[in-house]
């Protein structure tokens, strides 16, 4: 399908680019979208939570009172979980929340997300550009010219240091290269802005 190519002023260049049907025109698979977003959110968790259990509490090992004849329950250690300051029963331990997904599932999820965005009219293609110096105001102006929303995702073909540094301080918009594009970022933005070179990169990455 043909999409007009815009310049940095948001005007049509008179040229168009062909977005492959097998990447941007498939029927979105909702289950793979769910799995990919679940994996992304799981990978954001540090998993560094830790609570001390009974064996890790510092305290005396002296028996608190005699075993029988007190009229209350027997107790052998101040570190018991039933006492204040004692260890926690089955407390959280450091762990990883990472989820494994097959490459084909991840690829299908990205295709589904791209197809969903295009069908919703939330995909625009802009000609390749660069900045002479890192300037957030300059990049913000380009994004506002091209996009109708302030929550956009700009996908570039290759890493451009000046563009990256210019977009690092933007509050809601994000800059990623095509190799690092993920399903969550596609779905989370209100408008997807692709550069010409990023489209070619996506063809090579996803058309496998």
Image: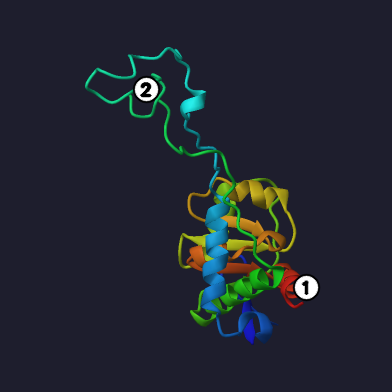
Q: Quadrant of the C terminus?
A: bottom right
What mark, if any, has residue 204 been given in the picture? 1
From the image, state whether disc 2 or disc 1 is nearer to you: 2
In this rendering, the answer to whether 105 lies above or below 131 is below
Q: Please state if 85 lies on the left or on the right of 42 as rendered.
A: left
Q: Position of residue 103 (x, y in %)?
A: 70, 68
Label 2 vs 1, first from the N-terminus: 2
Within the image, what quadrant is residue 11 found in?
Answer: bottom right
Q: Nearer the viewer, residue 25 or 146?
A: 25
Q: Quadrant of the N terminus?
A: bottom right
Total number of numbered discs in the rendering: 2
List x then y, in percent, for residue 55: 51, 25
Q: Secondary structure at mark 2?
A: loop
Q: Describe the element under mark 1 as helix, strand or loop.
A: helix
Q: Nearer the viewer, residue 133 or 185?
A: 185
Instruction: Identify the image quadrant of residue 5.
Output: bottom right
Residue at 62% from the left image edge and 80% from the top image edge = 24
The residue lying toward the viewer, choosing from 44 and 183, is 44
Location of residue 140 with respect to 25 vertically, above or below: above
Dot 2 and dot 1 residues touching (CB under 8 Å): no
| Numbered mark located on residue 92 in the image | none
Give x and y (percent) for residue 85: 37, 22
Residue at the farthest left position: 71
Asked whether 44 or 79 is in front, the reply is 79
Q: Report the disc number at residue 85.
A: 2
Q: Residue at x 48, y 39 (%)?
A: 92
Left or right: 77 in relation to 198: left
Q: Which residue occupies 72% across, 62% down?
A: 179
């Amino acid at each position: 399908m043909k999409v007009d190519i815009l310049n940095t002023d948001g005007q049509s260049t008179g040229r168009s680019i062909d977005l492959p049907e097998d990447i941007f025109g498939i029927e979105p698979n909702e289950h793979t979208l769910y799995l990919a977003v679940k994996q992304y959110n799981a990978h954001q968790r540090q998993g560094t939570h830790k609570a001390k259990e009974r064996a890790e509490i510092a305290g005396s090992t002296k028996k608190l009172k005699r075993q029988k004849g007190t009229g209350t329950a027997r107790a052998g250690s101040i570190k018991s979980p039933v006492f204040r300051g004692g260890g926690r029963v089955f407390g959280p331990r450091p762990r990883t929340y990472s989820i494994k997904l097959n490459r084909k599932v991840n690829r299908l999820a990205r295709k589904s997300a791209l197809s969903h965005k295009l069908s919703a009219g939330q995909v625009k293609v802009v000609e390749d550009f660069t900045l002479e110096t890192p300037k957030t105001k300059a990049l913000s102006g380009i994004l506002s010219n091209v996009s109708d929303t302030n929550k956009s995702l700009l996908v570039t073909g290759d890493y451009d240091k000046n563009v990256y540094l210019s977009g690092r301080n933007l509050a809601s918009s994000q800059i990623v290269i095509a190799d690092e594009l993920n399903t969550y970022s596609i779905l989370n933005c209100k408008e997807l802005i692709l550069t010409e070179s990023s489209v070619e990169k996506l063809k090579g990455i996803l058309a496998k």
